[in-house]
Amino acid sequence: MRFFIFIAGCFFISFGLFAQSDQLARNYLDQGEYEKALQTYQQLVKENPGNSTYFYGLITAHQQLEDFATAGNLLLERQKRLSSSPNILIELGNNAAMQQQQEKAKEYYQMALEELKENPNYTYSVARTFEKYSLLDEAAEAYKLGIAASTEMKFDLPLARIYGEQGKLEEMFTSYLDLMEKEPELSYNLVREFDRYILEDASNPANMALRKLLLQRLQENQDMVYNEMLAWLFVQQKEYNKSFAQEKAIYRRNNGDLQRIIQLTIIAKNDGDLETAKDLVSFIIEETPSDNILLQAYQLLLEMKIETAKTSDYAAIKKEFQELFTRFGTGPETIRLQLDYARFLAFEMEEPSEAINLMKELSEKNLSNFDVAAVKMVLADVLVLEEKFNQALIYYSQVQNLVKNDEMSQEARYKVAKTSYYKGDFEWAQNQLDVLKASASQLIANDAMELSLLIKDNSLEDSTQTALKKFARADLLAFQNKPQEAIDVLEDILKNHKGEKIEDEALLKQAEIYEVEEKWSQAEANYLKILEFFSDDILADNATYQLAELYNTHLENPDKAKEYYEQIIFNFSDSIYFVDSRKNYRQLRGDSIE
């Protein structure tokens, strides 16, 4: 037993030494110390002649030293010892290519492919070896031979990827679609492959190629996978109405399952295509047999109506709420609808007292802790609207106690901080924010960080915090849906506190309110001022990105948009806007591949 342990110990020590020597040799190659790499690999091959990793390391060392003759002889010797050696033939071809002997190299590559016809089990390793040397045509041919040799061999996916690298979009998409048809269970994973090429721009060559193939296939074959892929493509292009047409076809053939329609509704709504979202909701209302889905659909429809409504529409919307309560009741099952109604009364109808009474009645009902917390959160928000800050703080604190481990608790703590900030109690607000920065969800943590920096930066140079109090007032007015009053307070800051730390914050806040009011030129002027006078401050990336978005979406100036997206990419690489800027920049530049 001791002898066995001794032998095993020697083996592991020896294995460890070989691994260290191999790593050392690799390091020598990486650092360009080819003589040292050669000596190390020679020793490794001498002690382990059957190890292919050491052998090919030795070949590389000889080639880097331009000793192609020795490399070639070693490869030929190894070929003689092996019964089948298509990979050696590729290595011989590469050795010839490195000597500019292109015809000889092609002969070796063709010999490897011919040998592959006799031994298709080598398909993957041969193709990968061709890929290693960027011989994509030969790699594609190897995969085709493997597919032709046996239907059991799974080479469709790597072949499609080769087509993609070659820029053969139609061949690539054809291969992926063939694979989807044969193995539908792979569809989810394959969509990620499509996503590498598809852009929001419908005129992107990859988008056009995929759309053409899908329409052709639908004419020949009514397989639902093609409807699903067309629906997906139209979503990527933000053509939600076209996606809806495909989803209706899928719904008719999918036993009336509305889940895909519901998902598309949410996507369209969140992306601002409210017209299509409304059409989708109307379809759901017509088709669903479920009262629960019907209630959610009506609720979503009302949310969108409120979002686009004018003051003259409010009475009709209020009547729709009341009709829904008559139909579905005012019990726990309609709690979300009742909360939406309370917000509508307070923030749109300017009837906060009615909203407060409704919330107080709801909080007395037999509800779950989560629902009671949701009611108290809305009640507190309305009390802030009414500037009844102390009462609001009590309810926010109650929410934290009701749902201690839920994200709603973190949101309530943030609102405690924001309410304290509104009322000018900056020290208590800062205490709450310090807790949130470390423990909250990413979104709340980011908001907490921004508010914390605002308070700190504008408390150091002004012990009276006069400008900060004005800024908090403007913030509250914006929350109360009084944009012009907020703009006026911010203008006061810009005139009477020029040169103070808060000036760039006031410019940014005012620009954001201008955008809400669709005053695009005023917003543009503010962003440009920030970049002119505060280009080294923390808000420079915010202003740069928002200016790029303004040019891209409202001022219809893609060249200017591209210029400012590019500034984010090169000057603010650690910005939270970096990824979106790069994506939008590439789309405007017309890149066909992400």
Image (cartoon, rainbow, N blue to C red):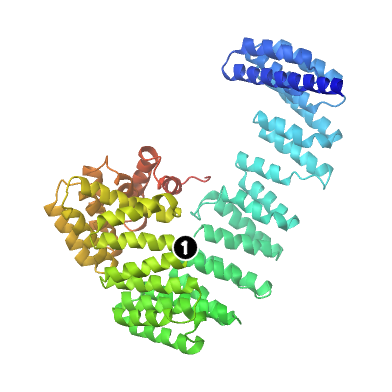
Query: Few, some or many C-alpha atoms within 10 Å of disc 1 (few <14, some 14-19, many ≥20)?
Result: few
Q: Is residue 26 above or below residue 374?
A: above
Q: Residue at 21% of width from left, 66% of height from top?
A: 484
**Left or right position of 81 against 166:** right
**Which residue in the rendered view is the most extreme toward the bottom?**
326
Q: Is residue 31 above or below residue 164?
A: above
Q: Residue at 26% of width from left, 64% of height from top?
A: 476
- 105 and 238: which is toward the camera: 238
**Which residue in the rendered view is the most extreme toward the front?**
2
Q: Where in the figure is residue 408, as x and y percent of width and height?
A: 45, 64
Residue type, label 1: Lys
Q: Where in the figure is residue 119, as x and y percent of width and height?
A: 85, 34
Q: Residue at 68% of width from left, 74% of height from top?
A: 255
**Left or right position of 315 against 265:** left
Report if residue 355 is visible in the image.
yes
- 489 and 373: which is toward the camera: 373
Q: Residue at 36% of width from left, 74% of height from top?
A: 379
Q: Where in the figure is residue 186, as x and y percent of width and height?
A: 70, 54
Residue at the disc numbered 1: 404
For mark 1, give the secondary structure: loop
Report if residue 96 is visible in the image.
no
Tally the numbered discs: 1
Q: Where in the figure is residue 294, as x and y percent of width and height?
A: 54, 80
- 445 and 60: which is toward the camera: 445
**Left or right position of 466 against 547:** left
Q: Is residue 503 above or below residue 574?
A: below
Q: Quadrant of residue 493?
A: bottom left
Q: Quadrant of residue 1?
A: top right
